Image (cartoon, helix red, strand yellow):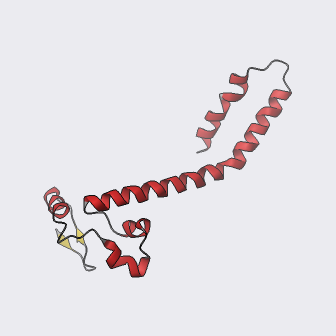
């Protein structure tokens, strides 16, 4: 276990990691007190500053990470929307120009392939 200049620890051995995770009195996981005044007290901000130590912090971090991923996914999907609209419009235009249409082959199966290909 190596103590760094900023007071944190650099852990590389499994035994050291186990000791830190089990000793929640020495290695407190409540960073709200330490980092709250500077970075804010919401769980997403606080748990992203330092790695989790105790199970309560892991739970908080998991919830905060899930919330972050939901927001990131929503932004990513929103960013795809103009392209998806243009693609569907083009597919519908192509269908309108055909005499014989297979909705699965000519429309529905194309959408997931195009979406996956653009991500």
- Please determine whether, in this image, residue 119 is positioned above or below residue 27: above
Q: Say left or right for 72 vs 61.
A: right
- Residue at the location (31% across, 58% down)? 58
Say which quadrant the N terminus sits in.
Answer: bottom left
Q: Residue 65: x, y in percent?
A: 42, 57
- Residue at the location (78% across, 38% down)? 89
Quarter of the figure with residue 18: bottom left
Say which quadrant the C terminus sits in.
Answer: top right
- Please determine whether, in this image, residue 17 is positioned above or below residue 31: above
Q: Nearer the viewer, residue 119 or 33?
A: 33
Quarter of the figure with residue 48: bottom left
Q: Nearer the viewer, residue 84 or 46?
A: 46
- Residue at the location (48% across, 58% down)? 68
Tally of marks: 0
Q: Residue 7: x, y in percent?
A: 24, 78
Q: Say left or right for 74 vs 85.
A: left
Q: Say left or right for 20 vs 96.
A: left
Q: Nearer the viewer, residue 91 or 27?
A: 27
- Please determine whether, in this image, residue 94 is positioned above or below residue 60: above
Q: Residue 79: x, y in percent?
A: 65, 53
- Please determine whether, in this image, residue 28 is positioned above or below residue 100: below
- Residue at the location (65% across, 48% down)? 80
Quarter of the figure with residue 6: bottom left
Q: Nearer the viewer, residue 56 or 98?
A: 56
**Residue that protrudes farthest toward the top in the picture:** 100
């Amino acid at each position: 276990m190596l103590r760094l200049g900023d007071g944190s620890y650099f852990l590389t051995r499994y035994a050291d990691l186990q000791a830190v995770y089990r000793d929640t009195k020495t290695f407190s996981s409540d960073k709200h007190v330490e980092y709250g005044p500077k970075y804010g007290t919401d769980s997403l901000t606080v748990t992203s500053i330092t790695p989790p130590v105790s199970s309560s912090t892991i739970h908080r971090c998991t919830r905060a990470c899930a919330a972050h991923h939901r927001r990131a996914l929503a932004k990513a999907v929103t960013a795809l929307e103009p392209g998806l609209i243009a693609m569907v419009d083009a597919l519908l235009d192509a269908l309108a120009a055909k005499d014989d249409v297979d909705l699965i082959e000519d429309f529905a199966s194309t959408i997931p392939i195009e979406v996956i290909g653009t991500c």
